[in-house]
Amino acid sequence: MDMLSGFAVLVIFLVILAIVIVFMGVTVVPQGYQYTIERFGRYTKSLTPGLGFLMPFIDRVGAKINMMEQVLDIPTQEVISKDNAMVEVDGVLFFQVLDAAKSAYEVRDLQRAIQNLAQTNLRTVLGSMDLDEALSQRDSINTRLLTVIDQASNPWGIKVTRVEIKDITPPADLVEAMARQMKAEREKRAVILEAEGVRQSEILKAEGEKKSTILEAEGRREAAFRDAEARERAAQAEAKATLDVSEAIAKGDIQSINYFVAQKYVEAMQEIGSARNSKVVLMPMEATALIGTLGGISEIAKQVFNDDGSGKPRISTGSVPSSD
């Protein structure tokens, strides 16, 4: 009875030992992680997510590395800019482990190392810039930080995916000075814009007057040209009438002379009578001559129109009516 009890205990012990050995030789790696495996203290391999097997009592899990993208805060720190302005700066950094073995064995305390590296390079980048540049060129600062930190942390098996500056806070007195400067700049721009507006207005006004003067001169030139043309045509008509009268006189038509002289008398009387300051008109001519002239005109009219009183004009082939 005692021997069976001892054998049973041995079997139970062996079963338990086997279960423990199996349990020690199997491990489960969750999604998003990798485990480093060490054999006698030396790295041998990395286990990816899922079921993994180990040599019991020989292999052991060295480090459990998070392979997902992680965010790391860059604590607030004071930085002196290139123009000696003291500002407080903080930010965030995103990184992802690409090589679990390097991140586990190439650096001690990975996150602290990345944080210190980011703070150091942040002071370096902002220290090389003026305050105005630092406040207006955040994208440039982020790009420079990303490039520098990513290159420096490459041996650690990580990839820095993004660096963002959250706040750049100048001292209160500097903020007040910047506000006054901004106000002065806006007032300066307002004065410049107002002067520019007055200048443009004066230019447009001068251009309008110039165009108006040019148009007025062109109008006078056109009017003078037309007046000259009208006088030329009147002279031509006068010459033609004189020629016709001369031809009529050459043919012995005395009424044509009377018509021509009477026309000149009438035109002269019209000019004298239209004068505004002439209340008394002196006519240096003989009344009988004017009556005779008018008589000649009546004779011409009778030859132009029919004698039967119908009022219809008789068709004449000459420019000056003849007494025949």
Image (cartoon, rainbow, N blue to C red):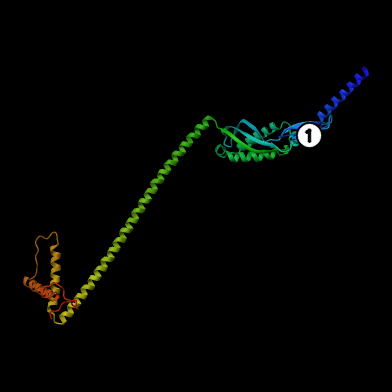
Identity of the residue drawn at 63% across and 40% down: 144
Identity of the residue drawn at 52% across and 30% down: 173
The location of residue 240, given as percent across then percent down, is: 21, 75
The location of residue 126, given as percent across then percent down, is: 60, 37
Mark 1 closeness class: few <14, some 14–19, many ≥20 residues within 10 Å:
some
Residue 35 versus residue 283: which sits nearer the camera?
A: 35
Quadrant of the image occupied by residue 48: top right
Report which residue position mark 1 lands on: 52
Identity of the residue drawn at 42% across and 41% down: 191
Q: Is residue 283 left or right of residue 243?
A: left
The location of residue 210, given as percent across then percent down, is: 34, 55
Quadrant of the image occupied by residue 212: bottom left
Residue 252 versus residue 145: which sits nearer the camera?
A: 252
User: Looking at the picture, which amino acid does disc 1 mark?
Assistant: Gly
Q: Is any part of residue 238 visible from this angle?
A: yes
Placement of 188 over or under 274, stated as above or below: above
The C terminus lies in quadrant = bottom left
- Give the farthest residue toward the bottom: 251
